Amino acid sequence: MSDGHVFFLFGEELTARASGVLWWADRRILCVSDLHMGKSERMARRSGVMVPPYDTADTLLRLQNEIEALAPETVICLGDSFDDLQASGSLDPAQCACLYRMQAGRKWIWIEGNHDPGPVAFSGAHLAEYRDGPLVFRHIAELQLLAEDRAEVSGHYHPKAAVSVGRRHITRPCFLYDQHRVMLPAFGTFTGGLRSDTAVLRDVMQPGAVAVLTGETCHVLPMPRG
Amino acid sequence: MNIGTIQDSDRLKVRLRGRGGRALGEVEEAFAATLEPGDSFLIGGQVVRYEGLRDLTVEVTKQPGKKPKIATFSGTKFATSTQLSQRILAGFQQKDWPELPGYMRDWIALQRHVSLLPRADRLLVESFPHEGRFATVVYGFAGRNALQTLGLLLSKRMEEARLAPLSFVATDYAVMLLSLEPLGDAAGLLAPAGLRDGLERWLAGNAVMKRSFRGCAVIAGLIERNMPGQRKSGRQATFSSDILYDTLLKYDPNHVLMQITREEARRGLVDFDRIEEMLARCAGRLDHKELDRLSPFAAPLFLEMGRVPVQGAAQERLLAEETARLMEASGLNKITLAPLQ
């Protein structure tokens, strides 16, 4: 697998990885968004729909692969890490152990999301947002960036983008970035996506924004705006 | 007596745009999904222009005079019987076909002229370039289900041979594969040992299995049926059945839904016995015609619904080419790699 697509945000070199995580090599920060752990459990609890309950295990396994590959000093989970606060208590012992192993020996930051707006049962810092250098990490992109925010890293919208290849439309989760921000795709196994030509994404992302499709390898294209 | 559940194929109403627009009929959802605004098709005796989908209705305007796309109804997919296939193949051996209408006689005669007519004791394979791709057509006369399976197996083998297959489509008499690279060795591709070996491995993770799984999952009430135009509304979680299938395959391959899916696929969509029968009656006797353009018998395959996409190298390659072209066209490829300060 290629190492991903390198781009610059306010002078900082960032890598959008094909797996869907963002890697800030200089600071050894791995950033991941919208894990939505416990989604199947929450769906069963709330609506009785019994989808296969393996999403949390699969999400953790894929995150573990990235952590092993990159050995980050800091991991930032950009919010909606758990599908709701109750779901954060639904991890089984093996899944908890997997999470503890990943947390061991590194700084771990849980950013609050709309699905998990409070402290969760796991260790690590629980923050509304986190700043490092010129970057601010928050769950939902601010439509107007604040004066002190030079560049923003966010999640929340689960962006995806479609490319027409001949008669076929290929849609994949994607990163979106412009000169001031980068938006991460959702990493959770059972998370859907919002197409990049949706009004809210067109409003948030500047003209000239770029989409990085995730999957086997990265594919970079101008953000489809419909 | 319980004889199981039959899923209806999805259809959408077609209506003229505007207040109180007249209903013209129904088209299959799969056909509606292929339409782009501006496309035209024939329905209810008139040519109409596709405008869009609203509330599960295909909205159209009148457009007389333009050559239409034709609405196809794939309907039920029963394979032709072995006997009928044999009769058709025997019929090809005649010198002429006075019992058939003129256009059909011309069509069959033209096939004999530019290529070969399929025979019961030999397997005809044609390959030719088409619109920047390469087509490979195998005239198996083994029924749609078996040829669908053959399409899967061959696409898998073509992927391994780095021919970058894109898609395949099967009918009762032939299967056509499209690839980015030309087919060289037809005999190697159709070697029985390789096909049998492929069958062991392909069962997991392919489009036909996923299609069977979707049917099972809908009947089981696990997922709702998705219709184009419906997706925008409604906040309830919609699920890609492909993701559910992949997850179950990875973590719970013997789940009851997976068992049912495998059984369904074996009975309905796989039909490997008829591939064996086809290979036995041809016993390695193979005619490979390399043509410079499509043949008369291959032409209908391009109109056939239900093309199955192959996920693989070809898709990645096309994506890479198309995204590079878009970056180039927008000029973004020149500026995004430079540090901004």
Image (cartoon, helix red, strand yellow):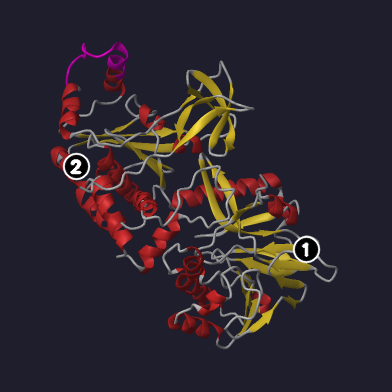
User: Callout 2: 10 Å neighbours few (<14), some, many (20+)?
Assistant: some
First in sequence: mark 1 or mark 2? 2
* Residue labelled with disc 2: B274
* Secondary structure mainly formed by the magenta segment: loop
Which residue: 56% across, 15% down? B65
Which residues make up the magenta segment?
B93-107
Quadrant including the C terminus of chain B = bottom right
Q: CA distance from mark 1 to mark 2?
A: 63 Å
Q: Nearer the viewer, residue B332 or B186?
A: B332
Count of numbered circles on the image: 2
User: Residue tagged by mark 1?
Assistant: B340
Type of amino acid under label 2: Arg
Q: Quadrant of residue B282?
A: top left
Residue A176 horizontal/vertical position (percent): 66, 58
Viewer-nearest of discs 1 and 2: 2
Residue at the right extreme of this rendering? A147
Q: Is residue B105 magenta?
A: yes
Q: Foreground: B267 or B104?
A: B267
Chain ID for label 1? B
- The dot on residue B173 is none
Which residue of the protein is positioned furthest toward the front in this rendering?
Answer: B1
Tell me the residue at 28%/59% (across/down).
B259
Q: Secondary structure at mark 1?
A: loop
Which residue is depicted at the point 76% across and 76% down?
A133
Q: Looking at the image, which residue is at 67% across and 68% down?
A: A14
